[in-house]
Image (cartoon, helix red, strand yellow):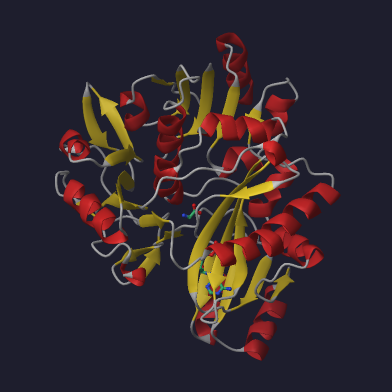
């Protein structure tokens, strides 16, 4: 069968790569893909816009595609799933209504309140003066968030009252009209991704990512500079608690609201020093780069699992199988990211890195005249699996040493928090 993957990041390269390991998947098509999906055997990369729903649907019908898997949040929030499902196309991902879990933080907070899920205390403001008064009354540290999708730029963790007030002013100036002010939580963040068919839910291995650009988790936030799974921070017992107290109530409440959610629920959690988990945010899709660390450990066939969700058979699906060990993904970025950076530098060493046993998932790359060039802020995701956490980290960095391009930057301390 043929599967269509929508998106152009390391996450989508990893999804395509994993799908192609199944003997049932003969071909993966990827829109718009990247240099990695273009180099992947069995994968065809198609330069089509992800907001051109009509052309996507036509391609699915003409090519006889059995399943569509959507990577990024934007096409989900814009209703691509609704559009395709209306034409009886099987698609893994939530509808527009379900995607509000990520696309509106206020909506997600309300759902959590209804479901009785523990999350940071928060208040929603449509008036900046009221938000300012609330901040003065609460004091710092405090967190300010834009309600809608802001490509990772909508959150300020303010250590001082002044910073919080400035965040309100700049969000308002940028046109955000719904502002969330939230209690500051301390602890370590983990990403628990789960798949659901809208009725039952199955957590994947718990992961952690490093969001900040600088070593020691300093500097501006990025899309993610590295990830690993499973994280020892979430024990089997804690994962069960998270499933029972967070994931299942979320699915049940979505269902109660008449939302048919067949896709990923990604719970971004803060694990407090006492070991309890609170929700920081939900995403309505696979995490990037967490997926690049999770999928290499999955032994269950990904197509089987995704079909079980789309066809609402998840309750009968056998337990997920995972290989032992840990996977670590280190992101190579272009100098200047998450600010301005150069495109077009030739990349070398990917084959050598893979010959050393790692898998290199591409993010911002493209093939130009047969050559691979850097074409984004995050360029490559070098992923290695090891029996121990230490050996996985060592292999990932050994592979990274093979890779060169002008302006390459990567963090040397991925995983330091749990070593
Ligand atoms: P979000 O997009 O809501 O996940 O926020 C982006 C990042 O800001 C998170 O990954 C956290 O590092 C941080 N953050 C968000 N909410 C809080 C909070 N209530 N307390 C502390 N840090 C937070
Ligand atoms: N790694 C963070 C995210 O996917 O949102």
Residue pictured at 51% horizontal, 53% vertical: 151
- The residue at 57%/30% (across/down) is 304
Give the quarter of the figure containing the C terminus. bottom left
Residue 259, relative to residue 35: is it above or below?
Answer: below
- Which residue is nearer to you in this view: 337 or 355? 355
Look at 58% across and 21% down and name the residue there: 56
Q: Residue furthest top?
A: 62
Q: Is residue 89 above or below residue 234?
A: above
Res. 180 in view? yes
Q: Nearer the viewer, residue 48 or 290?
A: 290
- On screen, residue 22 versus residue 184, left or right, reads left
Residue 340: image x %, image y %? Answer: 32, 53
> Is residue 80 visible in the rendered structure shown here?
no
Measured along the vertical axis of the image, is residue 254 above or below residue 304?
below
Residue 119 location, quadrant: bottom right
- Measuring from the top left, give residue 339's x and y in whole percent: 34, 57
Instruction: Give x and y (percent) for residue 135.
Output: 64, 84
Residue 335 position within the rendered picture, expressed as x and y whole percent measured from the top left: 24, 54
- Between 127 and 365, which is closer to the camera in this rendering? 365
């Amino acid at each position: 069968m043929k599967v269509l993957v929508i998106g152009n990041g390391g996450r989508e390269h990893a999804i395509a790569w994993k799908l192609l390991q199944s003997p049932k998947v003969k071909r993966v098509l990827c829109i718009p893909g990247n240099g990695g999906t273009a180099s992947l055997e069995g994968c065809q990369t198609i330069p089509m816009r992800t907001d051109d729903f009509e052309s996507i649907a036509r391609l699915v019908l003409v090519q006889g595609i059995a399943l569509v898997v959507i990577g990024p949040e934007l096409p989900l929030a814009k209703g691509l799933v609704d559009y395709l499902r209306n034409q009886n196309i099987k698609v893994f991902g939530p509808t527009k209504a379900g995607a509000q879990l990520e696309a509106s933080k206020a909506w997600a907070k309300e759902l959590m309140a209804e479901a009785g899920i523990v999350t940071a205390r928060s208040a929603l403001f449509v008036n900046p003066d009221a938000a300012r008064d609330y901040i003065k009354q609460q004091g710092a540290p405090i967190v300010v968030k834009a309600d809608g999708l802001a490509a990772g730029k909508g959150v300020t963790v303010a250590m001082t009252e002044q910073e919080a007030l400035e965040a309100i002013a700049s969000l308002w100036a940028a046109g955000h009209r719904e502002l969330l002010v939230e209690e500051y939580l301390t602890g370590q963040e983990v990403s628990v991704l789960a798949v659901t068919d809208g009725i039952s839910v199955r957590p994947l291995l718990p992961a952690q990512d490093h969001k900040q650009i600088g070593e020691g988790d300093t500097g501006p936030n990025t899309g993610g500079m590295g990830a690993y799974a499973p994280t020892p921070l979430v024990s089997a017992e804690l994962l069960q608690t998270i499933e029972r107290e967070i994931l299942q109530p979320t699915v049940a409440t979505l269902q109660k609201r008449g939302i048919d959610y067949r896709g990923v629920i990604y719970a971004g959690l803060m694990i407090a020093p006492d070991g309890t988990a609170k929700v920081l945010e939900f995403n309505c899709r696979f995490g990037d780069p967490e997926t690049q660390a999770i999928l290499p450990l999955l032994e269950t066939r990904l197509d089987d699992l995704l079909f079980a969700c789309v066809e609402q058979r998840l309750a009968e699906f056998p337990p997920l199988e995972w290989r032992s060990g840990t996977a670590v993904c280190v992101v190579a970025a272009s100098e200047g990211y998450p600010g301005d950076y150069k495109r077009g530098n030739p990349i070398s060493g990917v084959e050598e890195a893979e010959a050393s046993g790692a898998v290199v998932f591409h993010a911002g790359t493209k093939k130009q005249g047969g050559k691979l060039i850097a074409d984004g802020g995050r360029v490559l995701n070098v992923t290695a699996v090891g029996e121990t956490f230490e050996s996985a980290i060592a292999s990932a960095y050994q592979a990274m040493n093979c890779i060169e391009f002008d302006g390459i930057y990567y963090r040397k301390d991925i995983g330091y928090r749990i070593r």
